[in-house]
RNA sequence: AGGCGCGUAGCUCAGGGGUUAGAGCACUUGCUUGACAUGCAAGGGGUCGGUGGUUCAAUUCCACUCGCGCCUACCA
């Protein structure tokens, strides 16, 4: 009995690790064969990070696609790698230093960077191990890091070439400045949100003559840097003031009143203070009107010495109070009110950002964006779902230059050197910079201190991972990649920039398709985050976790420890038993099943439990199939066995399920693919075919039994191959036992061919026959179920009416029909014969009758039939109404009309039967 | 302000101009049926957000509207 080799219970932990080690050791994740290339590059997770639900979801999608294409015979590469994540990583290590009472500045740049590398080496492999637990078939032999030497070389190459073309420049401009991290940020790293604040009204007196102008501000401290007041050019109230001067309180500076279109006369007083050095709009107003910029802040956002001594050195928020107080004292404060307005914060530090005048490096974005827009317009890159293209276009068509320099230490150092007079020399290295600018060796050069935005190296990822700027065979083979799988949150940060850089340096798009998925949220639709305490570790879903450990994980190391009790309470309430071990396959199947086209995904643990049950179901089905096989392994099932209707039916159904699954996978609809297989396995193979096969196997027809044996195995083996991309572990474990019985000799299901639907012939006759049988059985079960008859009780069934075909099938399928329906005796009743009181069901034109004879409660049966009658009457009315409408008859397609016609006849017939039945039961029982 | 999306069973979600709108979970009832109680069988539960339009036919297409979410920009 082969079944004994399979464990009695499905225990994922016992099969997963072993299978994965075998795959990796065999080198099967590397590209193989000479099939068409299929390539996905992983969105590199942060080296600081550990695998979260978003990764797990995304990696499941990528792995399923990769495995599917590998089985289809494509030469597949799923390229792994990790991102150095400049700010995030630097912050992590700085926090560690803080705990030791050290700061990075005390340590010095060189030592600090050494510390970060050491930390990366010790903990950077974690995410790879987690990916392995998930079953990810990444080619780890090609592992990359955005900061390793090969990737750094690509970065320098791109920087130098863009600089040569004038597409990278250095310039003084207002940037979004993070005073806590003390670095510039790109526009994308700014998160704006509405917050409560105040609107102060300040009074600036005119220099000549009486009076004053009043201006509103949310940041009064910036008035220390004011260099003008602006009004709208058409504002009659202020027209005569344009050109006159006001005296800026506290500083005594005389500043002009200018006219500028940017001023909204409707807002506030219609006069606006202009601080070109600390506001983006003011910067433009200043530029247009020749106003100077006065920087009033230090990089830490303290007041600098351009201000009156009383304020110098104050933090900006303290300075705000002090300025307001001082203005109030001198009568220059005209009022204050509460005001809700938008505050820009840094996405990492959460610090309030300041527009700040500095020298930074920029990428000139518009010239790069133009071909990238065209590539999407003409379909060289296709978004799935397509509506994301609109978002892409909107951003790309209004793209601003990209600030790429960061005042950090962890990252790619900018390959630029400065001479003593500040002249800039760019080169791949210092020697090249000297050579290119003919500088003598002793000419003193100082390297730029800044590093590049992390996303700069990420933008090169699709070709830097393949070895560019070397012309490697991999680059030739796998660029452009097939599909990028990513969340919409990094469409601009990453996707758009990869398309721009790919077109620029490879002359082609980096990928043909972009599959954009939603974000994983918790079951209430909340974003998963440490501070909300609703994070679920995907590994805890795989391995299970007890309640106390889960609480500990969620409450440890909180930024706001006061949230811990609430988090603990919520966690204990939601998971009173902790989380059971579902295994990687159930987790993966959940993600696949939830991968629909919506914007975000609410993760519900109950679904994973359901798919764990599906794994169990599959396991047990396989156990049954293996138990049914003849003794000796390796003997292929006899070919001359003659398959019965059930065998031919399940084969035909399998072919259709495979076709639907393949179509779904080809269109990135993993939800539909997983559902197609789930339904086939559970609802058709297990619920019906296994039960039908049991009957045949228990029968005395040896040939039929052999056919069932071979069909059981053949279908199971194909199902395992079909499910493997989504559930790699369980399918491998079961396939190892099943495949030899199906005559397959492969080493692993992961390198076996994905099943071809054409190998499973459609058989309309068998489908019709089994469908008929199902209808019959369902009719009997309905009677049984609704009248609470025990399933073990054999029934006597009378059959009346029906067509010749019905009678033939009753005969030919009787061997399956009796046991399936639990029928003891089937008697054909003449059409005009008087039926005894019975519970009834309709099966086409056939009336199925179960004589009451003390078995059935007539009242219950009357109620049941009454309900059916009501339904049928309603449907009949609707059909009659349609058929009475001449326009419907005239305009609707003939097949639709015919369909309604047939339906009406059927309903009439059914109603007739139901009425007769009810009539017969009328005077029976209570 | 502009753009995108969502609203279908108690919950999480599929679906799609045409017979009777589906699934999982939850719920009710009956079952230790020879793979599986992580199971089997039967059942209840929906005016498909609202209004109007197009159509022979709308839950599906269009317009408006209400509610919700996200993205981009931003008025001091």
Image (cartoon, coloured by chain):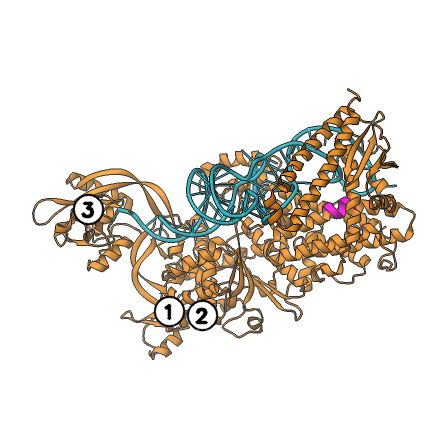
Chain colours: A orange, B cyan
- Asked whether the beta carbons under mark 1 and mark 3 sit within 8 Å of each other, the answer is no
Which secondary structure dominates the residues rendered in magenta?
A: helix
In the rendered image, the residue lying farthest to the left is A209
Measured from the top left, where is residue B53 in percent x and y? Answer: 48, 44
| Residue at mark 3 | A310
Can you identify the residue that label 1 sits on? A167
Nearer the observer, A453 or A524: A524
Q: Are marks 1 and 3 on the same chain?
A: yes
Q: Residue drawn at (75%, 26%), measured in percent from left and top?
A: A860
Q: Gap between marks 1 and 3, in whole Å?
A: 44 Å
Q: Is residue A2 visible?
A: no
Mark 1–mark 2 distance (CA, rounded to whole Å): 11 Å
Q: Nearer the viewer, residue A484 or A598?
A: A598
| Left or right of A434, for residue A495 | right
Query: Looking at the picture, does residue A605 appear above or below residue A108?
Result: above
Quarter holding the C terminus of chain A? top right
Numbered range of the magenta stretch: A682-689
Check residue A504 in the rendering and tell me which mark sits there, or answer none: 2
Q: Nearer the viewer, mark 3 or mark 2?
A: 2
Q: CA distance from mark 3 to mark 2?
A: 53 Å
Chain letter for mark 1:
A
Mark 1 and 2 residues: CB-CB less than 8 Å, in contact? no
Q: Secondary structure at mark 1?
A: loop
């Amino acid at each position: 009995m082969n079944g004994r080799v399979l464990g009695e219970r499905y225990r994922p932990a016992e099969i997963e690790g072993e299978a994965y080690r075998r795959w990796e050791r065999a080198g099967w994740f590397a590209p193989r064969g000479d099939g068409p290339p299929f390539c996905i590059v992983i969105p590199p997770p942060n080296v600081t990070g550990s695998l979260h639900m978003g990764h797990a979801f995304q990696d499941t999608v990528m792995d399923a696609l990769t495995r599917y294409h590998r089985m289809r015979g494509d030469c597949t590469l799923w390229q792994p790698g990790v991102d150095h994540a400049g700010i995030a990583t630097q912050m992590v290590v700085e926090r560690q230093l803080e705990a030791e009472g050290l700061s990075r500045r005390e340590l010095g740049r060189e030592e600090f960077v050494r510390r970060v590398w050491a930390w990366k080496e010790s903990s950077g492999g974690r995410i790879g191990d987690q990916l392995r637990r998930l079953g990810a078939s990444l080619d780890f032999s090609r592992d990359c890091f955005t900061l390793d030497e090969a990737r750094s070389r690509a970065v320098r190459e791109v920087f130098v070439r863009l600089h040569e073309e004038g597409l990278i420049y250095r310039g003084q401009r207002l940037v979004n400045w993070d005073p806590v991290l003390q670095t510039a940020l790109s526009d994308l790293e700014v998160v704006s949100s509405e917050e409560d604040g105040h609107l102060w009204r300040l009074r600036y007196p005119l220099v000549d003559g009486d009076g004053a102008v009043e201006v509103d501000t949310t940041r009064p401290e910036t008035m220390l840097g004011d260099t003008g007041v602006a009004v709208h050019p058409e504002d009659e109230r202020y027209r005569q003031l344009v050109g006159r001067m006001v005296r800026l309180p506290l500083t005594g500076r005389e500043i002009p009143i200018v006219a500028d279109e940017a001023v909204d006369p409707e807002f506030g007083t219609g006069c606006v203070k202009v601080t070109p050095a600390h506001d983006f709009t003011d910067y433009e107003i200043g530029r247009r009107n020749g106003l100077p910029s006065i920087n009033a802040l230090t990089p830490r956002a303290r007041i600098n010495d351009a201000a009156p001594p009383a304020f110098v050195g104050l933090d900006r928020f303290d300075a705000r109070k002090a300025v307001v107080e001082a203005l109030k004292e001198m009568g220059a404060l005209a009022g204050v009110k509460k005001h809700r307005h938008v505050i820009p914060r840094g996405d990492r530090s959460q610090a309030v950002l300041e527009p700040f005048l500095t020298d930074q490096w920029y990428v000139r974005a518009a010239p790069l964006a133009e071909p990238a827009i065209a590539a999407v317009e003409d379909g060289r890159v296709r978004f799935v779902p397509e509506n994301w293209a609109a978002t892409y276009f909107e951003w790309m068509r209004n793209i601003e230059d990209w600030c790429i320099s960061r005042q950090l230490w962890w990252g790619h150092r900018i390959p630029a050197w400065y001479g003593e007079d500040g002249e800039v020399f760019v080169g791949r290295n210092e020697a090249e910079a000297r050579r290119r600018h003919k500088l003598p060796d002793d000419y003193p050069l100082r390297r730029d201190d800044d590093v590049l935005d992390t996303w700069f190296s990420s933008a090169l990822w699709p070709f830097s991972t393949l070895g560019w700027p070397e012309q490697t065979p991999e680059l030739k083979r796998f660029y452009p990649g097939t599909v990028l799988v990513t969340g919409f949150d990094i469409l601009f940060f990453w996707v758009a920039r990869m398309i721009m850089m790919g077109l620029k340096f490879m002359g082609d798009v980096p990928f043909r398709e972009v599959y954009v998925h939603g974000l994983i949220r918790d079951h209430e639709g909340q974003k998963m985050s440490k501070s909300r305490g609703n994070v679920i570790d995907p590994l805890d879903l795989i391995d299970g976790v007890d309640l106390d450990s889960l609480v500990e994980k969620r409450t440890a190391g909180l930024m706001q420890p006061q949230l811990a009790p609430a988090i603990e309470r919520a966690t204990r309430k939601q998971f009173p038993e902790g989380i059971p071990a579902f295994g990687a396959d159930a987790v993966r199947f959940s993600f696949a099943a939830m991968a629909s086209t919506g914007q975000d995904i609410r993760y519900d643990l109950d679904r994973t439990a359901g798919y764990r049950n599906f794994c169990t179901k599959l396991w047990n089905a396989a156990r049954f199939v293996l138990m049914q096989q003849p003794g000796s392994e390796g003997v292929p099932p006899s070919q001359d066995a003659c398959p019965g209707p059930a065998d031919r039916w399940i084969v035909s159904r399998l072919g259709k399920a495979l076709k639907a699954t393949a179509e779904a996978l080809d269109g990135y609809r993993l939800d539909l693919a997983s559902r197609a297989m789930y339904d086939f396995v559970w609802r058709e193979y297990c619920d019906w075919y296994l039960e039908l096969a049991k009957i045949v196997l228990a029968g005395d027809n040896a040939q039929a039994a052999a056919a069932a044996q071979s069909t059981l195995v053949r279908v199971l083996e194909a199902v395992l191959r079909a499910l493997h991309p989504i559930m790699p572990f369980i399918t491998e474990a079961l396939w190892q036992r099943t495949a030899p019985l199906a005559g397959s000799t492969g080493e692993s299901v992961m390198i076996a061919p994905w099943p071809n639907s054409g190998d499973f012939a459609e058989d309309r006759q068998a489908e019709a026959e089994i469908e008929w049988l199902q209808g019959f059985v369902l009719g009997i079960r309905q009677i049984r179920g609704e009248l609470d008859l025990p399933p073990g009780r054999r029934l006597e069934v009378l059959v009346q009416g029906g067509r010749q075909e019905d009678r033939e099938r009753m005969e030919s399928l009787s061997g399956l029909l009796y046991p399936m329906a639990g029928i003891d005796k089937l008697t054909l009743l003449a059409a005009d014969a008087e039926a005894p009181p019975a519970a009834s069901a309709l099966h086409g034109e056939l009336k199925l009758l179960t004589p009451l004879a003390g078995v059935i409660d007539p009242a219950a049966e009357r109620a049941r039939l009454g309900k059916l009658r009501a339904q049928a009457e309603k449907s009949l009315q609707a059909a009659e109404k349609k058929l009475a409408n001449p326009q419907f008859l005239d305009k609707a397609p003939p097949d639709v009309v015919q369909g309604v016609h047939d339906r009406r006849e059927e309903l009439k017939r059914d109603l007739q039967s139901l009425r007769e039945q009810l009539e017969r039961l009328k005077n029976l029982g209570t």
